[in-house]
């Protein structure tokens, strides 16, 4: 099936970097604006290994969906990873809203407010988010037809926007071309693509055995989102709570 990809951020430098890096990927929408305005099946939020939604986009989404969303993320991390999710993995939980129906949480760092500028965490986190799409659609075919991602690691993580865009493109390109049985196989493929070790695995990885069916990124012209409008439309969003990036 086809999956529409939207890159969205309020930081104009991040948006400009995406436009330069993804200029040949016309099927990818690059948007200057708020994540909360995107009508998609799933939001992606960069988080920490514990799933503590205490800053950046996580905090905005926690306010938008309520404290239950943090509880759901942390419960899933506890179930799969015994409470600490490694960078290079992601969770997918239901939001309780018709749109987006899902929140994908992917750690860019182990603790809050880490400098990850000298790591490969951005490509690991972004690829893990895409892998979560594959795995959710394997469990429930067609459940994620569109996805919105912010800049990963370009604010709190101190990753330059140009590098962030390049690493996110690498993850997206892999998503278009290949599918994987689990996050471990995904990491191996990234190491082969990038020609080396991507750093230590911190946390408690859990092998997933759900094999995903073939999923391709969707050209915008081929995408017809039939999902209902979000009944919980955030008409009172405080623009001052928007941000350049998150974790």
Image (cartoon, rainbow, N blue to C red):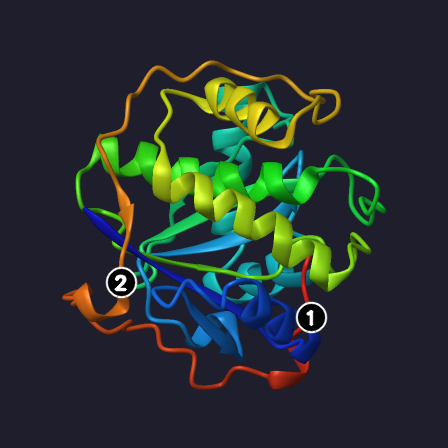
- Which image quadrant is residue 215 in? top left
Residue at horizontal 47 percent and vertical 19 percent from the top: 185
Residue at horizontal 21 percent and vertical 70 percent from the top: 221
Residue at horizontal 62 percent and vertical 48 percent from the top: 167
Tell me if 56 is positioned left or right of 64 in this view: right
Proximity of marks 1 and 2: CB atoms separated by less than 8 Å: no
Closer-to-camera residue (59/107): 107
Q: Is residue 111 visible?
A: yes
Residue 112 x, y percent position in the rendering:
78, 46
- Which image quadrant is residue 61 in? bottom right
Closer-to-camera residue (160/61): 160
Q: Mark 2 = which residue?
A: 219
- Which image quadrant is residue 13 in? bottom right
Residue 241 x, y percent position in the rendering:
66, 76
Label disc, if present, on residue 244 of the rendered structure: 1
Tell me if 84 is positioned left or right of 104 in this view: right
Which of the marked residues, 1 or 2, is nearer the chain's N terminus?
A: 2
Q: Is residue 55 visible?
A: no
Residue 232 x, y percent position in the rendering:
34, 72
Q: Alpha carbon of mark 1 to alpha carbon of mark 2: how far?
A: 27 Å
Please name which of the two marks, 1 or 2, marks the residue nearer to the observer: 2
From this view, report whether residue 83 is shown above or below residue 158: above
| Mark 1 residue element | loop
| Mark 2 residue element | loop
From this view, report whether residue 140 is shown above or below residue 150: above
How many residues crowd mark 1 within 10 Å: few (<14), some (14–19), many (20+)?
many
How many residues crowd mark 2 within 10 Å: few (<14), some (14–19), many (20+)?
some
Closer-to-camera residue (75/36): 36
Disc count in the image?
2
Label disc, if present, on residue 224 of the rendered structure: none
């Amino acid at each position: 099936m086809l999956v529409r990809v939207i890159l969205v951020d309020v930081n104009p430098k991040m948006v400009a970097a995406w436009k330069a890096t993804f200029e040949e990927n016309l099927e990818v929408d690059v948007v200057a604006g708020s994540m909360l305005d995107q009508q998609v099946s799933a939001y992606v939020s960069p988080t920490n290994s514990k799933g503590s939604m205490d800053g950046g986009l996580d905090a905005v989404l926690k306010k938008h969906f309520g404290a239950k969303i943090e509880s759901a993320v942390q419960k899933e991390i506890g179930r799969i990873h015994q409470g600490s999710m490694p960078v290079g993995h992601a969770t997918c939980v239901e939001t309780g809203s018709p749109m987006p129906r899902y929140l994908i949480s992917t750690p860019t760092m182990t603790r809050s407010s880490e400098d990850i500028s000298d790591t490969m965490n951005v490509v690991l986190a972004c690829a893990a988010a895409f892998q979560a799409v594959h795995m959710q659609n394997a469990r429930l075919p067609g459940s994620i037809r569109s996805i919105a991602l912010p800049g990963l690691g370009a604010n709190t993580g101190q990753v330059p926007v140009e590098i962030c865009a390049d690493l996110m493109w690498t993850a997206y390109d892999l998503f278009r071309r290949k599918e994987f049985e689990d996050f471990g196989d995904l990491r191996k493929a990234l190491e082969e693509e990038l020609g080396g070790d991507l750093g230590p695995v911190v946390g408690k990885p859990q092998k997933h055995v759900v094999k995903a069916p073939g999923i391709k990124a969707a050209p915008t012209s081929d995408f017809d989102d039939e999902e209902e409008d979000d009944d919980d439309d955030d008409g009172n969003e405080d623009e001052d709570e928007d941000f350049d990036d998150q974790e």
